[in-house]
Amino acid sequence: MRKQEVNNRMVLSNLFWRFSERTAAQGVSFIVSIVLARLLTPEDYGLIGLITVFISIATVFVSSGFGNALIQKENATQTDFSSVFYFGILMGIIMYIILFFIAPFIANFYNEPLLIPVIRVLSLSLIIAGVNSVQQAYVSKIMQFKKFFYSTIIGTITSAFIGIFMAYKGFGVWALITQNLSNQVIDTCVLWFTVKWRPTFTFSFSEMKKMFNYGWKLLISGLIDTIYNNLYSLVIGKFYSAKDLGYYNRGRNIPNMVITNINGSIQSVIFPTLSNCQGDKVRLKVMVRRSIMTSTYIIMPAMIGLAAVAKPLTVLLLTDKWLPSVPFMQFSCFILAFWPIHTTNLQAINAVGRSDIFLKLEIIKKIIGFSIMVVSIPFGLYTMMIGNCFSAVISSFLNASPNRKLLNYGYREQIKDILPAMLLSLFMGGTVLLWTFTDMSSIMILICQVITGILIYVSGSKLLKLESYTYIIDMIRSFKK
């Protein structure tokens, strides 16, 4: 029992540091994004969005699934980490060279000559990713998430000043590029000096082969997922305009920030934790259930509430010129509200070593999602977003289905666990939305919406005695002791 208590406190401690890191970093990024959105144009953001798909795909090859393989492997050695380190750098260089030479073809595809130098400079991030991916895996493996806090904060704040200064001086899209690259460089350098691990001059083909047997399925899964997630940007950039793409990306920005901050923090700690108890299916189910319920309890009201305040929030923070991004924000909120079900179920599948199931799921989900997208393209952007919402619901069901056998925790039981938080969130969101029909200023509407939403959700949780609410309160009290 004492050992279990120590383990729980270790998980809570790491979760605290990971959440603090993401909260601080996203908070700074949020402020910076507001400033940059006022200084830059939708076209500037659209240009970055046009090439994101290509760099994201190349990044998947750099990580190659070996980072998760290192975390999942029970007795990963120095040789394992060093081998993945050198392999990642090599793949980063190869991917950079490929993008360097195909940059003119990408620019021609979009009929945007400026994309050539933009791609060639921004693709330098691939080489940095080769170093950083192993550092991330090592810190996660030893459960020392406090290290991430320092590296991320220093990198985010420094790059923020650089980006804002360049935007103010009129550098346009290059302000975004420099901010992005400087953030990654500083983050990686700080980790290099704060983490004791250093690569040795060793490389094992046999160990790489063993990890590849696990990692190649995650590589293909990540590749499919990355291509699919960026297909919307590719389609919007090709069939519509860079301005439309700028609105689309800006609309997704805040919901994605919330997900990265909250759900991302939880999942980054949950995966190594689940991997450590992969032999105990009963305990594994308890942890997966707790993760889904807690994440949903926090994420669901955040997404529904954000959708309700989208218009006054956009006007207040970004000005009226970004109003066309509001519907995209609301669609993104609906899609991301199901994210805890997606991520936790997939983490559990990976933790028990079933990356083969993970790959099959990705293929099935993307075939369904791609089919829906192709059918919806002729009917306009909003129809595409509605189709994406349907894909999110279907995918949540598919991601949960394997765990009915693996953990005896299927979709029906999961929905039953999260239904109270979901219904309370919907009631809260509907009530909050009523404030938008008043004649008050945007800032007053927003203030009233936030206060109303918090009061309804917290008081409703106490009145209904929601399990997740009680758990979070107990967890906070335990951590303070």
Image (cartoon, grey):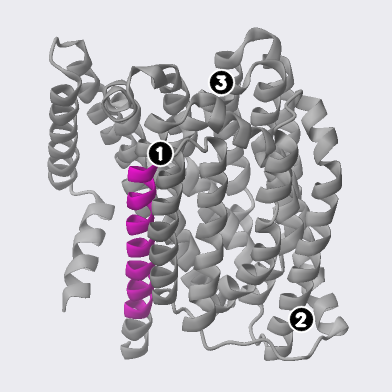
Residue 148 rendering spot, x and y as whole percentages: 44, 70
Please indicate whether residue 362 sits to the left or right of residue 321 in the image: right
Relative height, residue 59 to residue 286 (above, below): above
- Label number found at residue 168: 1
- Label number found at residue 83: 2
Location of residue 75 (image quadrant): bottom right
**Crowd around label 2: few <14 · some 14–19 · many ≥20 (10 Å):** many
Image quadrant holding the C terminus, namely bottom left
Kindly identify the residue that appears in the image at 65 percent across and 41 percent down.
Answer: 52
Q: Is residue 241 visible?
A: yes
Which type of secondary structure does the marked residue at label 3 adopt? helix
Tell me which label, 2 or 3, sits earlier in the chain.
Answer: 2
Q: Nearer the viewer, mark 3 or mark 1?
A: 1
Q: Nearer the viewer, mark 2 or mark 1?
A: 1
Q: Which residue is mark 3?
A: 243
- Label number found at residue 195: none
Say whether residue 213 is magenta.
no
Q: CA distance from mark 2 to mark 1?
A: 43 Å
Could you tell me the amino acid type at mark 1? Tyr
Q: Range of the magenta residues?
A: 8-33
Residue 122 rendering spot, x and y as whole percentages: 66, 49
Location of residue 457 (image quadrant): top left
Could you tell me the amino acid type at mark 3? Lys
Tell me which label, 2 or 1, sits earlier in the chain.
Answer: 2
Say whether residue 18 is magenta.
yes
Kindly identify the residue that appears in the image at 47 percent across and 78 percent down.
Answer: 143
Residue 459 rendering spot, x and y as whole percentages: 12, 41
